[in-house]
Amino acid sequence: MSGSAQARRILLRQVQKMKVGKSLFLVLFGLLAISASGSVVDFFAISIGTNDIFQYAWSDGAYVRKLQPNITGIRGPEQFDFTGPDRDLLVADGVLAKVLVLDGVSGLKLKTIGGPDMGQLYGLKVAPDGTSVLVTNVSGNRILRYDISTGQFLGNFATEAQGGLNSTRGLAIGPEGDIYVCSQGTRSIKRFHWPGGEYLGDFTTGAEIQYPQYCKFAPWGDLYVASWGTKQVLRFAAGSGQFLGVVVDKNTSPISDPSACDIGPDGLLYVADRALNIIFRYDPISGQFLGIYAFGSGLSGPEYAAFGPGYAYKPPTAFSVLKGSVFSGNLSDTSESDDHYLILRPGIVVNKSVPPIQIEFEGSVPVATTDQFRVRVEAAGPGGLCDQYVDLWNFTTGAYDLLDFRRASTADLPVDVGRGLSPTDYLEPGTGRMKVKISWKPVGPISGFPWSARIDQVAFFGERL
Ligand SMILES: [Ca+2]
Ligand SMILES: [Ca+2]
């Protein structure tokens, strides 16, 4: 059991025992949700119109950043989930018909999972074992299972032969660890036993759900379902699945097209509206409308949204050229991935083993005590035989460590270093200051005279402030 799952169970027991008032319960839950996660919690929403994932600060809904398609490779994002000590972000991509595995700290695409017969994907959840991922195939009426580290297909977890599973959409994991799936064709949420996949029947009773897209269990066990056909969010009782009523309705609040919902660290209900491109906030029990939580910055079609670990980046604060010279551009050209460049040219070559372009950037992660860090360099070198090196300054040894070495790409290529490394050596204690060195060295014929290398972005990723 994960730390946060254990914390939820302990909390549920406390709440059942104490019969505390709701406000105290929400405060208790909020404190636990933050401390159990090990990092800042933020709100994430897919943007199907732009193929991004938007991140908003959970406390006030302020825009933080977006994980852009040129970095993530996303073409048709649907449900996503975070997992593992390195904060992997798994996304079901309905257009690529693959699961994308991204670095959840920086957003960089790490790999894809899935064979040629995966079909149109929709729902995705990391399985309770933490090592496999479950994805729904909409038209195949199936739930597929893949090993996350090897990408190997582990077989169908559930098929339409089990309970008439039809048009499978979003997935959820219940408080007891069973798997729940939105079955649009049968207008119900179906339950399957983990890990065997035995069909346990329709969980929801007492209400027909018109076009359920996504559903989510609250930490207190109730199931919330976005019923897209009736423009409502419905609530079903923990354990029994008995219908408890409509919580959100387009006739009594400004919502238009609820597609997904989640419970925040404050215990409130957050609902994504894919038509209005707004995230609304409600009381999860009374259904009282609490206003707009987040919107804007180009969010388009938030079909799925959920809370997850919040990381962010800062641009470099200074650079110094150690070998070679600046041909054009300045520091501000390296702050974003926008095809505005700092362009460098080599110095006089006296010793061929010394890279004739060497540049050092200084910056810091957003929070010095971060549990994760990455340094991103998006750059390109000349055509021909030229190598590119990325080194990080090790504050413990007082020397540079070579962390990435490759043939220079002629097109812009984002390279991350720092994944799996302890921040202790590479972040200056107390300040979070970092130094990265990028070098280019010809190892054979080079195209262009004089040749050059360009840097589009340098970024320092860590836990959001
Ligand atoms: Ca670029
Ligand atoms: Ca740039």
Image (tube, grey):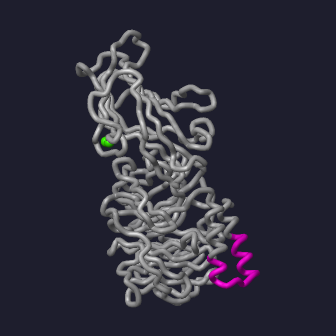
Q: Which residues are magenta?
A: 9-26
Q: Quadrant location of residue 299?
A: bottom left
In depth, the one of 114 and 39 nearer the eye is: 39
Q: Residue furthest top?
A: 350
The residue positioned 37% from the left and 73% from the top of the image is 278
Tell me which secondary structure the magenta stretch mostly adopts.
Answer: helix
In depth, the one of 42 and 412 nearer the eye is: 42
Vertical position of residue 27 compared to residue 101: above or below: below
Vertical position of residue 244 compared to residue 82: above or below: below
The residue positioned 52% from the left and 55% from the top of the image is 465
The residue positioned 59% from the left and 79% from the top of the image is 222
Residue 372 seen: yes
Residue 121 seen: no
In depth, the one of 175 and 449 nearer the eye is: 449
Residue 384: x %, y % from top left: 30, 22
Vertical position of residue 131 compared to residue 393: above or below: below
